[in-house]
Image (cartoon, rainbow, N blue to C red):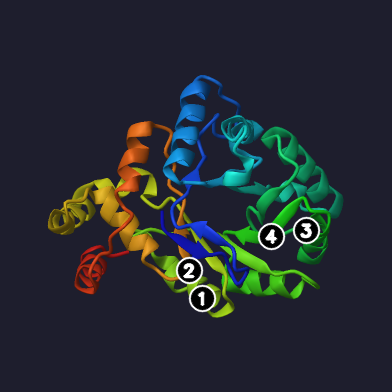
Amino acid sequence: MEYRELGRTGEKVPVLGMGTWGMGGRFERDERYDEREIRSLRFGIEMGLTLIDTAEIYGAGHAEELVGEAIKGLRDKVFIITKVWPSHYTYEGVLKAMEGSLSRLKTSYVDLYLLHWPSATVPIEETMRAMERLIDEGKTRYIGVSNFNSAELEEAMASLSRHEIVANEIRYNILIRSAEKDPIPFCLKEGITIIAYRPIERGSILTGYVREALEEVGRKYGKTPVQVALNWLISKPMTVAIPKASRIEHLKELAGSLGWRLSEEDVRLLEERIKW
């Protein structure tokens, strides 16, 4: 496994983790594939994909429960990220939401707690006051945000009095690169880790001209389109990726994106061929 520093914390996290959106349902609970998904999560941990991203909204909390089952006896080996939904952004709402997540995850703390989206209704100062309390109480080690642009990030940072934002989880992949205009430059300047979700854009990179470009480059390295796209992404500074992998065969393919690097020439080729 390759590792990268989380923000300016000195903490090293895997450049490739596991996302859980869709596990245990989407916005409603779905238990049909529980055994398969727990098995896949455990297999991924054994492979070194020890960064696991989830959220209280996923499967109406069931994704967190699946993660909690998968990490039994392995808590000290994994880095757990979960997220609070905007409807819980009041001071008391954040504290209560964390208690729910900890209960479902069967742990006394999470490693990184994120605001899932910006809120247009609750002042960020109130929300961040609760987030800082969670660090002080040992219920999360670090705090961050998700889907924040640079202006929203700046406001969130200014609302903190004694802790830092260490990560911004955003939609970013070789096909969807608008984040390279904003907020990625701001994140790099401020030392904020970029956590890329939808790194293969739910399979969209495996169609049409995008797949053709990835296959062309992949033939030089003996790699699949997915492996090329992920390698492109984790080669970016301060960036880690969290592909969803609810099947063991997918996890095995993901592992092939590690341990090598695209040449600068091939990076340019891909970015010229794959327009956004």
Residue bearing mark 2: 238
- Three-letter code for the amino acid on which mark 3 is drawn: Ile
Name the side, left or right, on which 173 lies relative to 74. left
- Secondary structure at badge 2 equals loop
Q: CA distance from mark 2 to mark 1?
A: 7 Å
Name the side, left or right, on which 158 lies relative to 43. right
- Three-letter code for the amino acid on which mark 1 is drawn: Leu
| Label pair 2/1, CB-CB below 8 angstroms | yes
Q: CA distance from mark 3 to mark 1?
A: 24 Å
Residue bearing mark 3: 135
Residue bearing mark 1: 188
Residue 114 visible to an observer of this rendering? yes
- Three-letter code for the amino acid on which mark 4 is drawn: Ile
Q: Toward which corner of the image does residue 271 lie, by quadrant?
A: bottom left
Disc on the earlier residue, 1 or 4? 4
Q: CA distance from mark 2 to mark 4?
A: 16 Å
Of tags 3 and 4, the one toward the viewer is 3
The crowd level at tag 2 (other Cα within 10 Å; few <14, some 14-19, many 20+) is: many
Image height check: is 158 above or below 58? below
